[in-house]
Image (spheres, coloured by chain):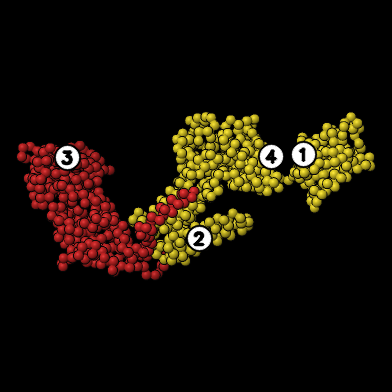
């Protein structure tokens, strides 16, 4: 009993000795929900932060008429590096900035062009919550512009962005994925891209390819469609809607793919390296404006073939763009090679960057319509003039 | 001092003993115009019917019994022919006689005989057997112990009708002369425990025993601990169950609470229903109980630690809501929680002793003060009320009310620790509590067994209850611990 007391006392005395006293009431803290990194013309970092204003959130019952403050505030500050900017930001905020709940990191267009590699150190050296925050690149705008958007559903924009990614059928892209990709041997990061539309709302704009070998500078963009296809090859896509013209049926058909599979097969033959990409998708026909009847086997085959071919053409175009124009291995073909041909990889490892544009890539898409929907042939027939 | 043959002198002796005791009555009876007989009894503790019909009437109406010649004394005659009483005895020691008179015996002193005849015709008003008020169950016996020792022993004997059920009687308390009974099942009980109990009871030096709590405090192993090392129950079926597990029960005259030793921490978390209801449901509710007990001890301090030190561990939406609700409150979170906890304990304490008629008043005032007004006025933030009320209610899931005392008390040191040092302080506090609990023992049984020291065979009955067919009961349970 007495010994236990002494032990307890000794254990507790350890704490004041370390001089650590980190008690912080929630009302002494400014919760930062998202940070944006921009590069100013003067060559400084501009850190914009979205800070929650607790008194502006919720509680509609008290003070019906009284003026409620906004639920968030966008603050920005410049600095020589990220932490310098944080310190400058703190000068404008009366509560201690708390980054533990930062959900989103947004990189402005100019910052992406300048290259964010030289500003990444703080996120690794002094990590707060970055591993589970999502990361985005903004096209043709600054990061701070995103934070001023008032979203439709949430009081604050930051959670909306990651939800948007999920609603597109994509797996969430976290900072940890970004870190892993920027440190990988061959793969280049494909970061989700957002842009602003005319109504000053955000819109999913595809992906940004950053060059991990050159300070994470921006190489180029993929548009929304292309980014979805690229993610299909990567296996990051859960569902996809495809609409294509079926010539024989004289109309277009839409199919919602629920089960998406991808297979990448690397076959070296002599000096030539063949990469076979086989993408399969199964789904439901949701709209049929052709005069074909999906319940009819032959018609269904026609529809499937047309859809597969159309998709295949777009994907081949996308792959060519990435391979020939950007010369960026965002599809992790290098990693597949490494996994499938570990012996040959040793000779190729250093020269992969040069080898990638020369790969012979074939893409094959197989779309199966498992479910023709609730009706057989299109109702359109009955609206048309007979004969 | 012994009594003599002279009735007058004896009377005077007893009148001296019972000076100013208005409830002790003296009654002289004359046989053949000679005061030959003196009755002494305590008014209100004897069965007056017996006195009237078997002592006074025969003597007064029939005169001296004819058979007297064959007997050697009147006392003998009473014993043999008149008193239809099970227990009689002849004594000549004044103090012993006086004691028995006060316990409800009728003393008969006869002129010319140097001893008194004592007849046990004790009868007094007592509470009848009622439903248990503290340990209610949905299923199982509805009897509870009363203040009368004999009634209580009867109730146990009725459940366990075996001669192996032993009841050893002791008298303790130099003034109160309280009768207590140690009961156990021979062959099941651990002899070591029984020996310890007997020894410790023999050493009790108290003037009066008003409640079994006096005995508990006198014979428990550790005084400076919030944990009780003896169980107490008002249910005969619980006592019987514990006896079957090889434990010792101590029944105290005048107390409806029977002590049980040895007990463990886990025993206090079991309800009698656990063995009456179907086992699947019992396992479910047992785990609910474990969860809520942890919750009641840790939740308030966890709340403080998380909101004051480790904000990143709280999901964002919850954190912003908490921050929003805290915005207006003037006190630090720790102070808020302490205030509300004290308030809650105060309400609980007030609720116990309130007369029935005033009870609702406290409920209303408490609900208004704690629930509404404090939050409305912005003095206490709403989450605190939720935390404290939830933890408070959770602490009442512990089936034996007294086993919940320590857990309710230990919340406070944990609160202070987590307020000072966050999760680290909380961890230190929990470790200290565990060290303390493992250090405790109850009559030789480690308090935290069978978890520490680990006895995996018995662990199964602690975490879950298996259906009876799968449980092999073997030997004295206490031996294996």
Indicate which disc, 4 or 2, sits on the residue closer to the N terminus: 4
**Secondary structure state at the residue bearing disc 3:** helix
Q: Is residue B207 left or right of residue A367?
A: right
Q: Earlier in the sequence, mark 4 or mark 1?
A: 1
- Marks 1 and 2: which is nearer the front? 1
Give the red chain's letter: A
Kindly identify which residue carries mark 2.
Answer: B370
On what subunit does the disc labeled 2 rest? B
**To which residue does mark 4 refer?**
B150
Residue B193 shown left or right of residue A231 in the figure: right
Question: How far apart, in angstroms, are the residues tagged by discs 4 and 3?
Answer: 84 Å
3D distance between C-alphas at marks 4 and 2: 46 Å
Which label sits in the foreground, 2 or 3? 3
The residue drawn where x is 80% and y is 53% is: B20
**Location of residue B290 in the rendering, given as x and y in whole percent from the top left corner:** 46, 45
Shown colour of chain B = yellow
Q: Are marks 2 and 3 in contact (CB under 8 Å)?
A: no
**Is A302 situated above or below B416?**
above
Are the residues tagged 4 and 3 within 8 Å (C-beta)?
A: no
- The residue that mark 1 highlights is B120
**Marks 1/3: CA–CA distance:** 98 Å
Determine the CA span between mark 1 and mark 2: 57 Å
Q: Are marks 1 and 3 on the same chain?
A: no
Residue A339 image label:
3
């Amino acid at each position: 009993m007495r010994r236990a007391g002494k032990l307890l006392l000794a254990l507790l005395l350890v704490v004041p000795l370390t001089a650590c006293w980190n008690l912080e009431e929630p009302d002494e803290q400014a919760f930062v929900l998202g940070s944006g990194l921009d590069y100013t013309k003067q060559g400084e970092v501009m850190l914009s932060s979205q800070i929650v204003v607790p008194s502006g959130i919720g509680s509609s019952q008290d003070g019906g008429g009284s003026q409620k403050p906004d639920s968030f505030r966008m603050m920005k500050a410049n600095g020589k590096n990220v932490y310098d900017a944080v310190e400058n930001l703190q000068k404008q905020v009366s509560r201690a900035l708390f980054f533990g709940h930062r959900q989103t990191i947004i990189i402005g267009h100019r910052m992406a062009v300048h290259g964010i590699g030289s500003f990444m150190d703080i996120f690794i050296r002094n990590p707060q919550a970055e591993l589970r925050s999502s990361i985005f690149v903004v096209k043709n705008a600054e990061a701070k512009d995103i934070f001023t958007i008032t979203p439709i559903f949430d009081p604050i924009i930051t959670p909306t962005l990651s939800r948007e990614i999920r609603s597109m059928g994509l797996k969430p892209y976290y900072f940890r994925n970004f870190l892993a990709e920027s440190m990988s041997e061959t793969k280049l990061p494909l970061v989700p891209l957002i842009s602003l539309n005319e109504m000053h709302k955000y819109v999913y704009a595809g992906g940004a390819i950053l060059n991990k070998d050159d300070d994470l500078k921006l190489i180029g963009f993929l548009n929304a469609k292309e980014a979805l296809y690229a993610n299909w090859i990567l296996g990051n896509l859960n569902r996809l809607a495809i609409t294509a013209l079926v010539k024989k049926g004289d109309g277009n058909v839409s199919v919602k793919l629920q089960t998406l599979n991808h297979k990448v097969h690397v076959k070296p033959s002599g000096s030539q390296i063949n990469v076979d990409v086989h993408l399969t998708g199964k789904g439901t026909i949701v709209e049929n404006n052709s005069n074909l009847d999906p319940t009819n086997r032959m018609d269904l085959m026609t529809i499937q073939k047309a859809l597969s071919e159309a998709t295949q053409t777009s994907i081949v175009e996308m792959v060519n763009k990435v391979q020939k124009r950007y010369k960026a291995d965002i599809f992790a073909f290098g990693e597949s090679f490494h996994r499938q041909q570990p012996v040959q990889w040793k000779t190729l490892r250093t020269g992969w960057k040069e080898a990638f544009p020369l790969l012979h890539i074939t893409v094959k898409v197989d779309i199966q319509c498992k479910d023709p929907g609730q009706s057989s042939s299109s109702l359109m027939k009955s609206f048309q003039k007979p004969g | 001092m012994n009594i003599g043959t002279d009735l007058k002198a004896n009377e005077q002796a007893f009148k001296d003993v019972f000076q100013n005791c208005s409830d002790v009555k003296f009654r002289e009876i004359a046989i053949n115009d000679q005061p030959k007989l003196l009755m002494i009894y305590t008014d209100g503790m004897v069965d007056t019917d017996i006195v009237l019909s078997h002592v006074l009437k025969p003597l007064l109406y029939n005169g001296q019994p004819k058979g007297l010649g064959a007997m050697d004394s009147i006392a003998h005659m009473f014993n043999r022919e008149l008193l239809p009483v099970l227990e009689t005895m002849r004594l000549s020691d004044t103090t012993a006689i006086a004691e028995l008179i006060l316990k409800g015996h009728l003393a008969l002193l006869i002129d010319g005989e140097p001893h008194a005849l004592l007849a046990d015709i004790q009868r007094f008003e007592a509470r009848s057997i009622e439903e248990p008020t503290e340990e209610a169950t949905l299923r199982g016996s509805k009897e509870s112990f009363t203040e009368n020792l004999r009634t209580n022993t009867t109730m146990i004997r009725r459940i366990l009708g075996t001669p192996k059920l032993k009841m050893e009687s002791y008298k303790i308390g130099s003034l109160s002369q309280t009768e207590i009974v140690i009961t156990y099942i021979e062959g099941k009980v651990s002899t070591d425990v029984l020996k310890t109990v007997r020894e410790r009871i023999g050493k009790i030096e108290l003037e009066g025993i008003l409640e079994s709590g006096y005995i508990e405090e006198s014979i428990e192993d550790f005084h400076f601990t919030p944990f009780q090392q003896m169980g107490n129950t008002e249910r005969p079926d619980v006592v019987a169950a514990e006896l079957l597990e090889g434990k010792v029960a101590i029944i105290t005259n005048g107390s409806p609470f029977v002590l049980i030793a040895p007990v463990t921490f886990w025993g206090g978390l079991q309800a009698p229903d656990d063995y009456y209801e179907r086992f699947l449901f019992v396992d479910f509710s047992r785990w609910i109980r474990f969860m809520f007990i942890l919750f009641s001890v840790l939740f308030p301090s966890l709340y403080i630690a998380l909101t004051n030190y480790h904000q990143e561990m709280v999901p964002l939406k919850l954190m912003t809501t908490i921050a929003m609700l805290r915005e207006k409150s003037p006190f630090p979170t720790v102070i808020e929680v302490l205030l509300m906890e004290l308030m809650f304990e105060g309400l609980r304490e007030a609720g116990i002793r309130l007369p029935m008629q005033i009870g609702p008043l406290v409920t209303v005032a408490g609900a208004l003060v704690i629930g509404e007004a404090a939050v409305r006025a912005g003095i206490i933030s709403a989450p605190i009320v939720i935390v404290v009320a939830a933890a408070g209610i959770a602490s009442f899931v512990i089936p034996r009310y007294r086993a919940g005392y320590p857990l309710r008390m230990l919340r406070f040191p944990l609160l202070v620790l987590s307020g000072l040092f966050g999760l680290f302080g909380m961890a230190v506090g929990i470790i200290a509590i565990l060290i303390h609990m493992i250090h405790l023992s109850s009559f030789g049984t480690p308090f935290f067994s069978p978890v520490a020291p680990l006895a995996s065979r018995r662990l199964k009955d602690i975490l879950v209850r298996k259906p009876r067919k799968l449980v092999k009961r073997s030997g004295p349970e206490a031996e294996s611990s």
